[in-house]
Amino acid sequence: MSGVRRVNLFSADVQYDADDPAGYVAGYRRLGPLIGASMVGATIYELAPGQSNCPYHYEYGNEEWLVVIAGRLTLRHPGGEDVLEPGDVVCFPVGPEGAHKLTNRTEETVRVLVLSTKHEPSAAVYPDSDKIGLWPGDERDEVIVRRESAVDYWDREL
């Protein structure tokens, strides 16, 4: 396969962010840069027992898919919770109906692949903490705010 860039979903190394809080310590590897992708994002997440990769949230602007590679994963969604097994694939559509949180409630490591479109601008809503994040495509303008911080359209304009 000369000229084809590849990554193995089962053996790819993951990295950890030192500032992840307890309960959200997740290994990850972003695959797009490794294989030369630009329009679809893909990240491998590895979750140790008791860990989640992100708070409960939903997206505006991007659809996400989840593929369970190894282990049994608890998926929280608007209708409740389900346990997913290796080979299961689910879609998180844009908007509140796509809300989700991934948690490992077993004693074994879980490995998943999350695929996503990469449209900007995009936004995420975090219902449990009542926050909204905005990603317009320029890091200088990225922001996560609490909904109660909303201001009137004309605030500071007059």
Image (spheres, grey):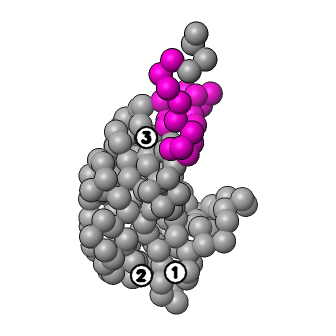
Q: What secondary structure is marked by label 2? A: loop
Residue 149 within the segment the image draws in magenta? yes
Q: Where is residue 73, by image quadrant?
A: bottom left
Q: Earlier in the sequence, mark 1 or mark 2?
A: 2
Q: Earlier in the sequence, mark 3 or mark 1?
A: 1
Residue 100 within the segment the image draws in magenta? no
Q: Which residue is mark 2?
A: 71
Amino acid found under the numbered disc labelled 1: Thr
Identity of the residue drawn at 48% across and 84% down? 105
Q: Which residue is mark 1?
A: 109
Amino acid found under the numbered disc labelled 3: Ala
Q: Earlier in the sequence, mark 2 or mark 3?
A: 2
Mark drawn on residue 123: 3
Locate residue 56, reporting x and y percent: 45, 62
Give the residues drawn in magenta, as a range.
134-154
Identity of the residue drawn at 34% across and 62% down? 66
